[in-house]
Amino acid sequence: MIALILEENLKPGDKLPNETILSQRLDVGRSSLREAMKLLASRNIVTVRQGSGTYIAASPGMVEDPLGFIFIDNKQKLVQDLLEVRFLLEPSIAAMAATRADEKDIKKITALCDEVETLLKNHEDHTQKDIDFHTAIALSSKNVVVPRLIPVINNSIPLFVETTGGILRRETIESHREIADAIACHDPLHAQDAMYLHLVYNRKWICSISQKQ
Amino acid sequence: MIALILEENLKPGDKLPNETILSQRLDVGRSSLREAMKLLASRNIVTVRQGSGTYIAASPGMVEDPLGFIFIDNKQKLVQDLLEVRFLLEPSIAAMAATRADEKDIKKITALCDEVETLLKNHEDHTQKDIDFHTAIALSSKNVVVPRLIPVINNSIPLFVETTGGILRRETIESHREIADAIACHDPLHAQDAMYLHLVYNRKWICSISQKQ
């Protein structure tokens, strides 16, 4: 089935042929085909839309929590270690983005920076938009692996937001803005430093939290 | 079901209660339970051993190819971009390993370094042992995220081995040994530099291959 998707060069959003055609092509019965479809859906390779058909998923093969972080018991250590990994990846990714971002990327990053700022100022939940901001930077790196990695690592953002509450509001607004501006100016060193500083604020806060506990 | 695994604090290798107990605990019928088990198996959360029972998987929640690299068309770009990510991660991870590795870790890393060397000298396939070597270093970092990340990124090693053939044999043996020795001496800077050099050899070779094509 995966072989067929690759062979046919089916892309995210494409509709799969119907059951009759598929069971002929793959030479399997309908019940085996349905079993296979359930497994592909559970791996987020296809999405079944009731009454409409089966489609290739938006990010095929990317399951929720693909590295199984839910099975790591010590959530405080998980938050610290995710942040340690973000320090390895995100400053360099910001530098890549500053070098390689095109006009469309810059528009997207700036718009998301604005949205996060508005949500923060209104004391609304900015978690998803924050992940989108970091993912937009990852996409601008033009590295095909990085945008698949960053949302996984940034699973940590909901945990951070939970532990940091609204306290980091001003620092988040200012450091996000500095990152976005540096990328817009194609200034890789400035983007790298601004991202590093953004992560330092997060680490300081997490350390102060864990000392209180 | 996942809630039950977390609640009961079941660990990799632990056996799940039998169907009767599970369907009572979860208040579902046997056929729904079997459906759920199939999905958990496809997500590599449990492993079904015929005639023996159902067990928690070795790395629960880690599926094969979790980031869906098979769906990235341009394999040459994938190899280059995976290597770019390895440059961001592995030198720092080698430094962490040099700082944090205990005696048991060092024994493991040295043994795997020996095994890869023997396989390379005998012109045998060293791919899996090479991945194990890098994973052992990742485990020694004592970061809980890193050992889940490195095997995914090192999906690239089979691709490298394919493209580089046996040519990198001497460089691989020497740079692996230097990494292992630096970790054994708890010398983080040396470990970091040795890993960087190891990746440089790989990049040089990949560049020379892609220029020929």
Image (cartoon, coloured by chain):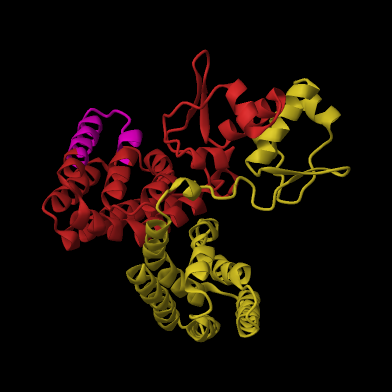
Chain colours: A red, B yellow
Tell me: residue A90, above or below residue B131: above
Please give left or right for residue A48 compared with residue A156 in the image: right
Q: Residue furthest right?
A: B51
Q: Can you give x and y, in whole percent of width and height, for residue B27 in the image?
A: 75, 21
Q: Identify which residue, A181 or B25, lies in the foreground.
A: A181
B54 left or right of B130? right
Instruction: From this view, report whether residue A48 is shown above or below residue A79.
Output: above
The dominant secondary structure in magenta is helix
Q: Residue at x 61, y 31 (%)?
A: A25
- Residue at 44% x, 43% y: name it: A155
Foreground residue, A29 or B16?
A: A29
* A38 drawn magenta: no
Task: Name the residue at 66% across, 43% down.
Answer: B45
Residue B178 at what x, y percent from top left?
49, 85
Question: Left of B138 or right of it: where is A92?
Answer: left
Q: In which quarter of the image is residue B210?
A: bottom left
Q: Can residue A101 be seen in this view?
A: yes
Q: Position of residue A102 (x, y in %)?
A: 17, 47
- The residue sitting at 54% across, 69% down in the picture is B134
Q: Quadrant of the N terminus of chain A?
A: top right
Tell which residue pokes out farthest to the top in this image.
Answer: A51
Asked if residue A208 is positioned above or below residue B108 in the image, the reply reads: above
Seen from the viewer's position, the closer of residues A48 and A166 is A48
Stretch in magenta: A108-130
Does A169 sit left or right of B36 as displayed?
Answer: left
Identify the residue at the far left of this view: A185
Is residue A61 something that shows in the picture? no
